[in-house]
Amino acid sequence: MSKRNVEVCFTPAVYDTFKKDEAIVVAVDILRATSAICTAFMNGVERIIPVATLEEAKAYKQKGFMVAAERDGIVRDFADFGNSPFNFTPERVAHKQIVYSTTNGTHTIMMASHSHQVLIGAYLNHQALVDHILKEQRDLIILCAGWKRKFNLEDTLFAGSLAQAVLRDNRFESICDSTYAAMDLWDVARVDLMAYLDKVAQRHRLARNGLDDVLEYCHTFDQTDKIPYLKDDYLITL
Amino acid sequence: MSKRNVEVCFTPAVYDTFKKDEAIVVAVDILRATSAICTAFMNGVERIIPVATLEEAKAYKQKGFMVAAERDGIVRDFADFGNSPFNFTPERVAHKQIVYSTTNGTHTIMMASHSHQVLIGAYLNHQALVDHILKEQRDLIILCAGWKRKFNLEDTLFAGSLAQAVLRDNRFESICDSTYAAMDLWDVARVDLMAYLDKVAQRHRLARNGLDDVLEYCHTFDQTDKIPYLKDDYLITL
């Protein structure tokens, strides 16, 4: 049997050159959307509805949903709380349906809906993802949300760590320059990950708004074995 | 005075998120277009007209121009020779006007024509580029041709080497994740560049067509101080 292919797509802007209906896609937005979503499911949320615009979030709120929404670090007045993973405590989210408003993250998740399966990936559920991907034996596309159509480092590093773990299984292979780049960057960064993250522009954007308290948490491995995935237009766990 | 900014754009597909009219853009297509163009000027060519399609190349041939054109490693029957840098010998090109047909390369060069200056970059004219960029003191965008809208390693490594050299001058700075990534990849690769290039998909594409004899040459520093640049729709040297 031919090997399964692992590819890393650095930005949604070039996803059209990667897309394959039969592949598993792991959507990645480490700071902070996919880390927050994994946290919410770890803490017992029943369902998350990702929306791209504040208008959509507001409409859901009016229908009685609990809504997480902020822009530029300020919780929107109609929202119940902001977008930080730390907001998704068991007390707030267990057994609830929650709307999560995120521009880059939602766009990234929804654009891969044609594929066999869209999984939500973060360091928090890293090993669970690896186990699932090895079991499924399908081509894998790791889709980084990036930043406004651009490459970003934090999603790329995660992509490198995930690709490396999957490629340890010799039923998988890669012939993709961006996969090799992501893995090499991960090898550089992993030596002192927190120090390396000083290069990350998003870290500084968050810091300017006092939101970088999540940095270390969002880079912590294996806090949950839950894997959120896209079912129709909402997220539940496998 | 505020510092000048250095940015690396991994693929023409996201150039719209980088473009600045006042910047200097260095167009990069190491395997092989920009390496071939630098070689041609080193060997005395007077002018190069880059064209994207074989139809355009053919039309120029009918008007009497000398044409370099190949696809999939086969020299086109109407062309004078193929696209390898090794074809641009002084005997063939000195004092001539030549049409060079290249899909990714031409598209990349022309899309930056709005900018202050579009320079043709390769390892072959690396130091000359650095000297010119430091002298001009403008924002710098290193624009990688990539491969069919995707990231590629060989252009990224060159971008890293160039960014690193420019950023040694403290009048320049970078706050761009892709610049840091390119420099870190260059630091990994430079230790044994020829061995590292085994990861490059384009190297294997060229090898399948017997065209990878240019690999080492296209990664040789400082063979010429000529800097080709875009003037209207053709290339001459500064």
Image: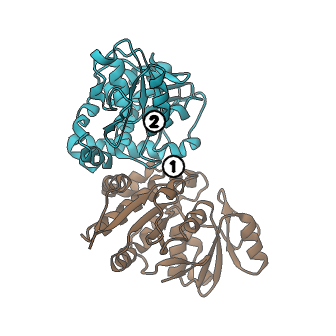
Chain colours: A brown, B cyan
Establish if B94 lies above or below A168: above
The kind of residue on which mark 1 rests is Ala
Residue drawn at 56 percent across, 22 percent down: B232
Q: Using the image, name the chain to which the residue with label 2 belongs.
A: B
The kind of residue on which mark 2 rests is Leu
Residue B54: which disc? 2
Q: Residue A221 sits in which quadrant?
A: bottom left
Picture coordinates of residue A223, whole percent (x, y): 42, 76
Residue at the limit of the structure toward the bottom, as seen here = A95
Give me the C-alpha separation between circle 1 and circle 2.
42 Å
Return the residue nearer the eye: A51 or B236.
B236
Q: Residue A124 sits in which quadrant?
A: bottom left
Q: Identify the residue position indicated by label 1 in the image.
A: A201
Residue B221 can be seen in this image: no
Picture coordinates of residue A186, whole percent (x, y): 34, 56
- Tag 2 secondary structure: helix
Specify the quadrant that holds the N terminus of chain A: bottom left
Picture coordinates of residue B159, whole percent (x, y): 39, 37
Return the residue nearer the eye: B172 or B234.
B234
Establish if B61 lies above or below A217: above
